[in-house]
Image (spheres, helix red, strand yellow):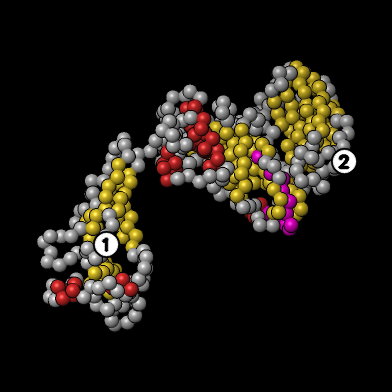
């Protein structure tokens, strides 16, 4: 601390050229409202030989900094000009006020001390104090969120708020601090998740603004493994170059309400095709955006459509690379899923890289030559074998529908190479239930070509 002796003489040395000298010592006292905020950490912004702060008096922060001390190590004085000296982290201790409020930060001069409390000492030994030392009060703005109001028009849970949210997820805009606070629509303490968007969609569609539904149980790891094991694209462990397809498979034991996937592609990927939903995922709105080499994919619904339960292909993205790529080269660490009630949930997912589709930049433009498929025996009472062939590499799907058009089972859903294939349907649904006696349709799709076979099931 500074001695009172000779203080007035030091002050008289102040002149107009003082601002050009570097600073060796800083001493400040800052006041705040302890009913609203509470400092927790004060950290130096530069390297100092002496840095000390005192938070023991509620409502005050005493800060003292020194450089150019003797003995060594020598640290040069703080240069003249704009410099950040320290960082102060504060917690908001006020309860929910139901309104926005701000509090001031002032520089405090204690009337009981015989010397100034706020001062700078220059390297020439001169002290600068107020009013020559101009001190500007600060402000902390304490914001009470208006949950669901993302377009900041004062009216939460509107279609306009949905549009803003979608733009955020696809990388078109960044949220302000106010929008980020408002984005926690489901009030789970995690801002800007796809669960918040799903919850907003429920409110916009007339559902009550409540979160009283019990959270789902986590799936069993063994069930997840066996469910995903039925997806077995050809040579998924092989490294691919040129054209390939990035695919995400998921498993869930409950209907999902939406997903957000920021997918970072390797640097040697020079073309990324159009993202498409898996064949079992229909009725969702799909929004995408690309930032650098990251594709941001958002799936959601305006009419409370839900993703199916069980294991299914979620999305696929064709791409072209200048060299080999593996599954490990892709980063999807921040995958975000929501249940149908607008609650963030963790589900199992798996990344696959499937065989390339030569001479094509996308799945949809591959034009295989389909040979006439066959089913034997037909009618059948235990199992039927469906045979087909393709003369070109393509994405293939073999699906079973009842006469009402409802999908009963998916037998194949992957890329195939040229050749003949056979798949067996045992008369069971995707959940393992035996179907009723009657007529069913087997739809076979190879790339853009498709055909159907009537199947007669007899018990």
Q: Nearer the viewer, residue 392 or 200?
A: 200
Q: Is residue 319 magenta?
A: yes
Q: Nearer the viewer, residue 172 or 39?
A: 172
Secondary-structure class at tag 2: loop
Q: Residue at x 71, y 21 (%)?
A: 405
- Residue 441 vertical placement versus 80 (above, below): above
Magenta stretch: dominant secondary structure: strand
The reply to whether dot 1 and dot 2 touch (C-beta < 8 Å) is no
Residue at the front extreme, as displayed: 16
Rendering coords of residue 289 (x, y %):
61, 44
- Residue 165 vertical placement versus 433 (above, below): below
Q: Nearer the viewer, residue 113 or 70?
A: 113
Tell me which corner region of the image, top left, top right, bottom left or bottom right, holds residue 399. Answer: top right
Q: Nearer the viewer, residue 200 or 238?
A: 200
On the rendered image, what quadrant is the N terminus found in?
bottom left
Which disc, if any, is residue 391?
2
- Disc 1 packing (10 Å; few <14; some 14–19; many ≥20): few
Q: Which residue is mark 1?
A: 134
Rendering coords of residue 15 (x, y %):
25, 73
Q: Is residue 75 magenta?
A: no
- Residue 295 vertical placement versus 195 (above, below): below
Secondary-structure class at tag 1: loop
Q: Residue at x 22, y 64 (%)?
A: 130
Disc 1 versus disc 2: nearer the observer: 1
Q: Is residue 224 left or right of residue 142?
A: right
> How far apart are the two marked residues, 1 and 2, measured between alpha carbons?
82 Å
């Amino acid at each position: 601390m500074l001695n009172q002796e000779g203080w007035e003489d030091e002050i008289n040395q102040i002149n107009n050229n003082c601002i050009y000298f570097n600073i060796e010592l800083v001493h400040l006292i800052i006041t705040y409202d302890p009913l609203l905020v509470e400092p927790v950490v004060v950290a130096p912004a530069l390297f100092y030989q002496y840095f000390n702060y005192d938070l023991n008096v509620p409502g005050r922060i005493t800060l003292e900094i020194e450089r150019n001390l003797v003995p060594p190590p020598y640290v040069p004085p703080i240069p003249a000009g704009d410099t950040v000296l320290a960082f102060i982290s504060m917690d908001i201790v006020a309860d929910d006020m139901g309104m926005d409020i701000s509090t001031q930060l002032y520089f405090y001069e204690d009337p009981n001390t015989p010397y100034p409390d706020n001062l700078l000492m220059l390297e020439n030994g001169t002290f600068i104090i107020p009013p020559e030392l101009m001190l500007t009060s600060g402000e902390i703005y304490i914001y009470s969120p208006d949950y669901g109001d993302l377009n900041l028009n004062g009216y939460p849970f509107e279609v306009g708020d949905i549009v803003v949210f979608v733009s955020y997820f696809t990388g078109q805009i960044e949220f302000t601090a106010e929008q980020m606070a408002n984005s926690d629509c489901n009030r789970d303490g995690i801002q800007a998740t796809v669960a918040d968007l799903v919850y907003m969609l429920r409110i916009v569609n007339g559902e009550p603004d409540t979160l009283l539904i019990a959270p789902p149980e986590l799936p069993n790891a063994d069930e997840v493994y066996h469910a995903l094991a039925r997806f077995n694209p050809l040579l998924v462990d092989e490294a691919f170059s040129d054209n390939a397809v990035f695919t995400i498979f998921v498993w869930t034991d409950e209907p999902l309400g939406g997903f957000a996937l920021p997918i970072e592609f390797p640097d040697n990927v020079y073309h990324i095709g159009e993202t498409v939903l898996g064949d079992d995922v229909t009725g969702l709105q799909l929004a995408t955006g690309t930032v650098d080499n990251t594709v941001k994919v958002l799936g959601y619904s305006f009419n409370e459509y839900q993703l199916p339960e069980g294991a299914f292909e979620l999305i696929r993205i064709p791409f072209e690379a200048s060299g080999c790529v593996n599954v490990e080269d892709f980063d999807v660490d921040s995958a975000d899923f929501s249940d149908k009630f607008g609650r963030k949930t963790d589900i199992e997912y798996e990344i696959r890289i499937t065989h390339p589709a030569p001479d094509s930049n996308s799945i949809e433009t591959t034009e295989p030559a389909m040979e006439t498929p066959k089913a034997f025996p037909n009618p059948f009472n235990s199992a039927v074998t469906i045979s087909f062939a393709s003369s070109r590499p393509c994405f293939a799907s073999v699906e079973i529908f009842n006469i009402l058009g409802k999908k009963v089972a998916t037998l194949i859903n992957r890329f195939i190479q040229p050749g003949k294939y056979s798949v067996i349907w045992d008369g069971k649904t995707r959940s393992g239930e035996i179907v009723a006696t009657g007529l069913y349709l087997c739809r076979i799709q190879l790339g853009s070509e498709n055909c159907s076979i009537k199947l007669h099931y007899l018990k």
